[in-house]
Amino acid sequence: MVGYGFRGKILLVDLTKAEILVEKPGEEFYRGYLGGPGIGLYYLLRRSNKRVIDPLGPENILVFAPGLLAGTGAPCAPRYTVVAKSPLTGALGKSEAGGWWGPELKRAGFDAVVIKGRAARPVYLWIKDGEAEIRDASHLWGLETGEAQEKIRWELGDEKVQVAQIGPAGERLVRFANICNNLAHFNGRNGLGAVMGAKNLRAIAVRGTRSVEVKDREAVAGILRWVAENYRNHPLSAALHEHGTPLGITTNNAGGCLPTNHWETGCFARAEDIGSEKLIEKYLVKRGGCFACPIRCKRVVEIQEGDLRVDSRYGGPEYEALAALGSNCGIGNLALLLKANELCNRYGLDTISVGMTISFAMKCYEEGIIDQSLTDGLELRFGREEVLLPLIEKIARREGFGNLLAEGSRAAAARFGRQSEKYLLEVKGQEVPMHDPRVKSGLGLQFALAVNGADHWFAQHDPFFTARDSFGVRGMASIGLGEPVGATDLDHRKVRQVLYTSYLNGAYDMLGVCVFGYVARSVTPLDKLLALVEAVTGWQTSWWELLKAGERMLAMAKEFNARQGFTVADDRLPEKFFSPLKGGPRDGEPGLDPGRFAAAVRLFYEMAGWDPGTGRPTAAKLYELDLDWLVEK
Amino acid sequence: MVTVRLHAALRSCLPHQSGVLRVSAAEGLTVRKVLQDLGVSCGAVGLVLVNGKMASLDRRLLPGDCLELYPIFGGG
Ligand code: SF4
């Protein structure tokens, strides 16, 4: 044993040479990079060696890395990160998923799998208790995710094998193809499924039967028990369990900020029909969860009869899927949305980008920019239920109009021409998630600054910090965020809040903890998380050290983006967010102020120690973060 | 009287699930006071509407007002 919480082994796979090696970093490495995106970025930067990489070429480095606490029995800490250059944005691709796969990899004896090259034919990787082999996957190619998982488990003779895989969309290099595990947990964003597809890598199957050593098992179990006993008494975690994220549909609608008809308004007349209460009443069969998480915020839905049968193996929709495919496309038929979500999961597609790319096409159709001669005869008006499933099928198969949409909305705009780009809602090429920066300015900064394109978990969300009794203000005073800041304020205090919580969320990802398990969005406070890290690793650590780790990861990400040609000019927002809100109680309220927003972005750079001229962290910052190996000499 | 309507996850704060109740509009009654009386944590509330318009927790309530409360939401 080399330490506690980590296994001390990284699996290095070269698919071109069909070669597998093991690297054994020391404890110091784990203390600096923890896990998840810390380890992912370390290998991506080291192995891509300053070059501009083709995201779909063999030189792209694809890393799967569970967080440090994953698999240790720490509560709500199931997450692993996938890192590579994104084929959707051309910037860093970084996407987290919960479920069981991350913990299983740790139990199998590895802290990460680093993949380069390209297999000559379809393969999958099989990792079991310290051993790994590359296996033929020709018979899996083309199968939906459910069938492929069944076949893999059958041929390996073990129902407990955890499978992270792409679907047919990833095989066909759809630029927003995702990676799923256990059919219902997703590394959803940035099109990382297409990176697997380009490598001819259909899946990574894992089985581990060896517990991860932790320093103080009793203490870890005690904190897990504490979460189990307390989550129902905390309004946020109780609501997550009861309603899941679909709660956001009716609450955002009431506030006039539910993206509707490609963000034309924030009010959707049929919000109640697709909200969490309707979902619970009509289709919920159980509440699902992740490894060692008592909160179980996931929805499992089923429809057994009629034209729209929905298989419960594929879980159920999050808020993002219901809004992106639903209100955002003007569609208020819940059964249809559950089917659309399930289809995306069968084929391996990111529901946010699918919904936003379809709504963009609908907008262009309604504006007369495109017509039925381009859309394979489909009439793409908002609210037309009959086009949703055919479009998803077409995208996944890259058929006709779907082939065009499969390149993402920004590429579609280039094809549509006729100034269609003014209707784009993306940052760095990634379609925006379902949260409106006009009602929370820090979220706007997140969208603009996130290293991996518009991302809604780059930092914490503004509403949790607006008053003295807000959960964020109460829970994060110890890291310097004890003063309330208004949701739409855009001054230095807001910039600092986004900066500090971007370090915090970075640390969360590196530890593998879920934002729905911990402050500000949930029940577990920072001191308990710190105690967990100490109990797992045996390190005497502090929030200073953990936040510095988060900052280190972000600096590495920023350096990677600079090497791929990104500058401060890419940290921008779509015009829409500078125009007034429409509909609901906020009707007519002004959007973000462009001058103040640009100043806030610049201030963020300066606070972070990033050079606005080059887009890189300054040499001083890299030295401070112990990243001298990244300093250009 | 003031009509108070709690939505979605906030409804479980009340003993009955209808989410609607009426409280007497005592002098100086504010949204915050209503929440305190109901035992609802202010941090759990994301949106306050009084007669369909956005309002703060310190908003004074008058007879005939309709107060609607929605749970806080962020980061789906
Ligand atoms: S809170 Fe939800 S998403 Fe997070 S670990 Fe638990 S079940 Fe998974």
Image (spheres, coloured by chain):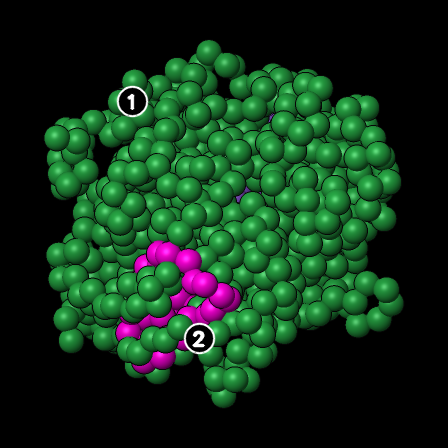
Chain colours: A green, B purple
For disc 1, the marked residue is A614
Relative to A236, A143 lies left or right: right
Q: Secondary structure at mark 1?
A: loop
**In the image, which disc is placed on residue A135?**
2
**Residue A92 or A103: which is nearer the viewer?**
A92
Residue A243 occupies quadrant: bottom right
Is A133 inside the magenta-drawn segment? Answer: no
Q: Secondary structure at mark 2?
A: strand
Q: Quadrant of the N terminus of chain A?
A: bottom left
**Residue A113 or A185: which is nearer the viewer?**
A113
Residue at mark 1: chain? A
Q: Which residues are magenta?
A: A100-129
Q: Position of residue A286 (x, y in %)?
A: 64, 70
Asked if disc 2 and disc 1 are in contact, CB closer than 8 Å, the reply is no
The residue at the point 42 percent across, 42 percent down is A54
Q: Position of residue A523 (x, y in %)?
A: 43, 56
The residue at the point 55 percent across, 71 percent down is A138
Residue at mark 2: chain? A
